[in-house]
Image (tube, helix red, strand yellow):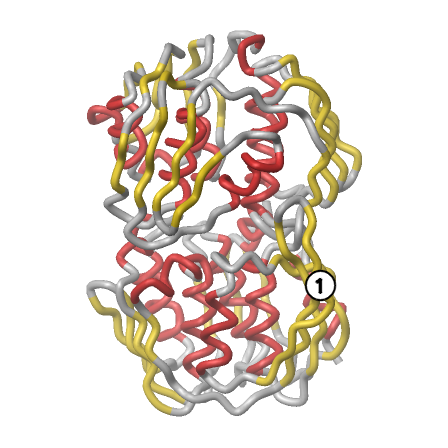
């Protein structure tokens, strides 16, 4: 793994076109649903990142036939009832999505298994998933009563529940809905704030009947899924780094194609609009129940704004790069209601504030977010990624506007979600 990378772009401009790689959330779910379903599923545009490959590895250990040819994946499955009990531990790597959603899937299966992730995953809270699953009769054993991995799962017959989400989390919601597929009765999930809805859309795409009424979701247990074809849109969380780069690097104009435009994920575009960024969205289309299109963005005069409330679940993964964006905006930007950042791959509030301060940013941490005053001329420095891909990419984009070079440690962690990130940056530097 790459341990460090020195970035010295000498005040570039950015011009050109980047095809955004596949959405990580949709890629994960395409494999999961294909493995649960009966028949053959083909996935087009799959993201070959470390996280998504961890999901494939887990299902291969469960006896599911999965083959990879570039961005195309073929899954042949006899359905969840015919999985084989794994002979070894299921390793989820750095992927919180794999870990939490697999808990929901395995809880209602016919196999026993053990899940464990890397050092970061072993510190991330799992009771937000294991507690409601236990209410569904799941048999789970883990450290601190299921709070941390490793977690042993003995598949069993589950019972439907009515569950009100205490936090906006697509991972928790998805784990419950995936468990509900193999539960007796109708499961009802009520959200306080709408989180990304890829699971609901993919359930429909694989033939399930699911009712969504505002923030209430109903799913009847006992439904069978059928293999199908999935087209994965580009990941807007990955596109966000180039959207910000295009807006803050002088004399730049970028075209980003294949960008997923699911409305539960487009909070970054709302922020860009509120801050006065110049961008357009074109060529919108719908495939596999997901919208995608092309975004053009150019250097912009930005102003500070306030970000919070129901907008946060729609951009939670983009907050590190939004913080960098705010350092180049005139006035104050306030990010609040983002406590969820504390339990990501690292405490992203502290990580973002610490690293941007090293570059000279006027940024202060709060209990639930941060306050940034701009615009600020950033200098170079040695930055830490904390093993967090989003922090690593933020540091790389920051290096495009600093007056001296930036060195980032453990740059290889970016491969978790965007293996070709540095190649794509280099392709548009002029």
Q: Is residue 284 above or below residue 377?
A: above
Residue 383 or residue 336, whichever sits in front? 336
Q: Secondary structure at mark 1?
A: helix
Left or right position of 21 against 197: right
Residue 61 or residue 135, whichever sits in front? 135
Q: Is residue 144 above or below residue 360?
A: above
Q: Looking at the image, which residue is at 48% across and 35% down?
A: 210
> x, y percentage for residue 429?
72, 76
Residue 398 appearing in the image? yes
| Quadrant in the rendering for residue 274 | bottom left
Q: Looking at the image, which residue is at 56% across and 20% down?
A: 224
Q: Is residue 178 above or below residue 14?
A: above
Left or right position of 29 against 342: right
> x, y percentage for residue 396?
56, 67
- Near mark 1 (Cα within 10 A), the count class, few <14, some 14-19 or many ≥20, is some
> x, y percentage for residue 394?
50, 66
Q: Looking at the image, which residue is at 58% across and 81% down?
A: 247
> x, y percentage for residue 26?
58, 43
Which residue, given by chain and number where applicable, does mark 1 sit on? 424
Residue 100 appearing in the image? no
| Quadrant in the rendering for residue 207 | top right
| Quadrant in the rendering for residue 124 | top left
Q: Is residue 135 above or below residue 302?
A: above
Residue 218 or residue 387, whichever sits in front? 218
Quadrant of the frame with the N terminus: top right
């Amino acid at each position: 793994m790459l341990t460090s990378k020195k970035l010295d772009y000498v005040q570039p401009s950015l011009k050109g076109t980047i095809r955004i790689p596949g959405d990580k959330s949709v890629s994960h779910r395409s494999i999961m649903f294909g493995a649960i379903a009966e028949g053959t599923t083909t996935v087009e545009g799959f993201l070959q990142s470390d996280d998504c490959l961890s999901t494939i590895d887990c299902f291969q250990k469960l006896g599911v036939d999965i083959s990879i040819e570039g961005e195309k994946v073929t899954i042949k499955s006899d359905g969840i009832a015919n999985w084989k009990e794994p002979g070894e531990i299921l390793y989820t790597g750095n992927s919180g999505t794999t870990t939490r959603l697999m808990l929901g899937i395995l809880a209602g299966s016919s196999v026993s298994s053990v899940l464990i992730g890397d050092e970061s995953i072993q510190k991330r809270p799992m009771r937000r998933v294991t507690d409601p699953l236990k209410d569904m009769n799941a048999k789970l054993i883990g450290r601190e009563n299921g709070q941390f991995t490793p977690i042993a799962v003995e598949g069993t017959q589950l019972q439907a529940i009515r569950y009100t989400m205490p936090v906006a989390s697509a991972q928790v919601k998805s784990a419950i809905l995936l468990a509900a597929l193999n539960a007796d009765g109708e499961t009802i999930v009520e959200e306080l704030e709408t989180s990304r809805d890829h699971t609901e859309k993919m359930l429909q795409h694989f033939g399930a009947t699911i009712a969504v009424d505002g923030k209430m979701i109903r799913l009847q247990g006992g439904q069978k899924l059928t293999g199908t074809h999935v087209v994965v849109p580009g990941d807007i969380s990955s596109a966000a780094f180039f959207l910000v780069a295009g807006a803050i690097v002088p004399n730049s104009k970028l075209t980003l194609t294949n960008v997923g435009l699911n409305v539960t994920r487009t909070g970054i575009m709302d922020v860009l609009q509120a801050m006065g960024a110049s961008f357009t969205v074109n060529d919108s289309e719908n495939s596999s129940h997901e919208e995608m299109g092309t975004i053009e963005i150019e250097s912009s005069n930005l102003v500070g704004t306030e970000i919070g409330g129901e907008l946060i679940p729609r951009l939670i993964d983009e907050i590190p790069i939004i913080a960098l964006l705010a350092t180049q905006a005139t006035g104050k930007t306030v990010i609040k209601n983002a406590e969820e950042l504390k339990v990501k791959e690292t405490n992203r509030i502290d990580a973002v504030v610490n690293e941007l301060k090293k570059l000279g940013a006027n940024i202060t941490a709060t209990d639930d977010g941060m306050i940034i005053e701009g615009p600020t001329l950033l200098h170079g420095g040695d930055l830490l990624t904390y093993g967090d891909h989003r922090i690593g990419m933020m540091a790389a984009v920051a290096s495009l506007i600093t007056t001296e070079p930036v060195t980032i440690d453990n740059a290889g962690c970016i491969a978790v979600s965007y293996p070709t990130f540095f190649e794509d940056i280099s392709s548009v530097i002029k």
